Image (spheres, helix red, strand yellow):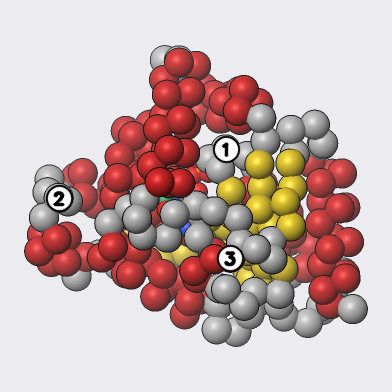
Amino acid sequence: MSSVPAIIITIDGWSSCGKSTLAKQLARELSYTYIDSGAMYRAITLYFLRNHIDWTSPAEVTSALQHISLEFRANHKNGQTEMYLNGENVEYVIRDLVVAEKVSEVAAIREVREFAVAQQQMMGRQKGIVMDGRDIGTVVFPAAELKIFMTADKAIRVQRRFHELYEKNPNVTIDEVRANLELRDYIDSHREVSPLRKAADAIELDNSHIGIREQLELVKEWVKQRLG
Ligand code: CDP
């Protein structure tokens, strides 16, 4: 599928169900830009942790956000886009459990969401993007041409995330990973501001028992239908 017209594809869903894997594959196939909205919330959380920001204080949050500049830059060695926080590459450090333990709390803050969503909407102005997250099809791009809502069995999601984190840090335990996933799923779906939910016009994709290639073929069909 080369030189396809530009549409917006949104991928929302629970933690660790493979949203970014699918989003990256799709972006590559379509020559679209992939945007990992979760990386933005993770980078903001990292900034708050490093600078001891009391995020229960709206005034402190508002003032801290004025010192945060987020940017996605391409890594020409591996072709991936990476998250930069105030000019520093934080792509790897934001995946740490220390950040994961706090990110859902930070992402539930109204001021934080307004800050991130405004930038996400700017990135989609030219279309030709695949963005994954929690509220992309419901709040960020409610008029997106193709919306996917991903799910997978919890035990499978825990295993997937455990393997990912274990590669970087062999001290991580499966119980820690499960607890983090359950906590984030709960906070993300119960928060007041833009909770995780399936948009009425999103297609649900449960990938518990389908492989990465099969999943891509399926979604490419949906893209074709939207373009047709
Ligand atoms: O990779 P995983 O699905 O576990 O998480 P992520 O996409 O990196 O997102 C990390 C956290 O950021 C989520 O648990 C949410 O709390 C928050 N998030 C959000 O609130 N809205 C988004 N559009 C994306 C992420």
Residue kind at label 2, given as amino acid type: Thr
The residue located at (56%, 30%) in the rendering is: 161
For label 2, the crowd category at 10 Å Cα-Cα, with few meaning under 14, some 14 to 19 and many 20 or more, is few
Of residues 91 and 77, the one drawn nearer to the viewer in this rendering:
91
Instruction: Return the disc, 3 or 2, that comes first in the chain's sequence.
Output: 2
Residue 56 marker:
2
Ligand 1 has an atom within 8 Å of the beta carbon of the residue at disc 3: no
Ligand 1 has an atom within 8 Å of the beta carbon of the residue at disc 2: no
Instruction: Return the disc, 2 or 1, that comes first in the chain's sequence.
Output: 1
Q: Is residue 11 left or right of residue 208?
A: left
Pointer 3: what residue? 137
Q: Is residue 180 visible?
A: yes
The residue located at (56%, 43%) in the rendering is: 14
The residue located at (50%, 16%) in the rendering is: 174
Q: Position of residue 19 (x, y in %)?
A: 63, 48
The answer to whether 127 is drawn above or below residue 167 in the figure is below
Residue 16 marker:
1
Quarter of the image where one finds residue 212: top right
